[in-house]
Amino acid sequence: MTYDVILRKKQNKYIVRVREWPEVVIEEETREAALAQIKQQLMAYLSQAPEVIPIEIETSPSAAHPWLQFAGMWADDPTWDDFVSEVATHRQEMDAADVDA
């Protein structure tokens, strides 16, 4: 079986967390050691036979989304298109700066 892991480097250490099991975490000096160790810890964790049970949560059909009141609030703003264009330009500049770094 394949599990997704989240691998990040922080202060000269590698931290690996199993996405499906966030309590399974390893911190090691090298990437290879972290990946090897996370496999061992995940196998040990799963050997304890955790029980996965689907549950259903009922929601009230009358509960409106809290952000719904803001939908369309800029529909009549004549500067909206300019704003969106500036945001897109800024994001492209930031992406280009990340590639250059």
Image: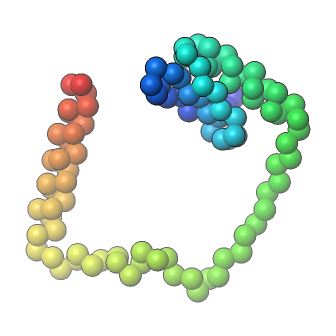
Residue shown at 79%/57% (left/top)?
54
Give the side of residue 48 with respect to residue 93, left or right: right
Q: Can residue 26 be seen in this view?
A: yes
Q: Position of residue 29 (x, y in %)?
A: 55, 16
Q: Position of residue 96 (x, y in %)?
A: 20, 33
Q: In this view, does 95 lie above or below 58?
A: above
Q: Which of 71/30 is in front? A: 30
Residue shown at 66%/41% (left/top)?
22
Q: Can residue 1 be seen in this view?
A: no
Furthest residue to the front? 11
Give the side of residue 56 with respect to residue 7, left or right: right
Count of numbered marks = 0
Q: In this view, does 2 lie above or below 49?
A: above
Displayed quadrant of residue 42? top right
Displayed quadrant of residue 71? bottom left
**In which quadrant is the N terminus drawn?**
top right
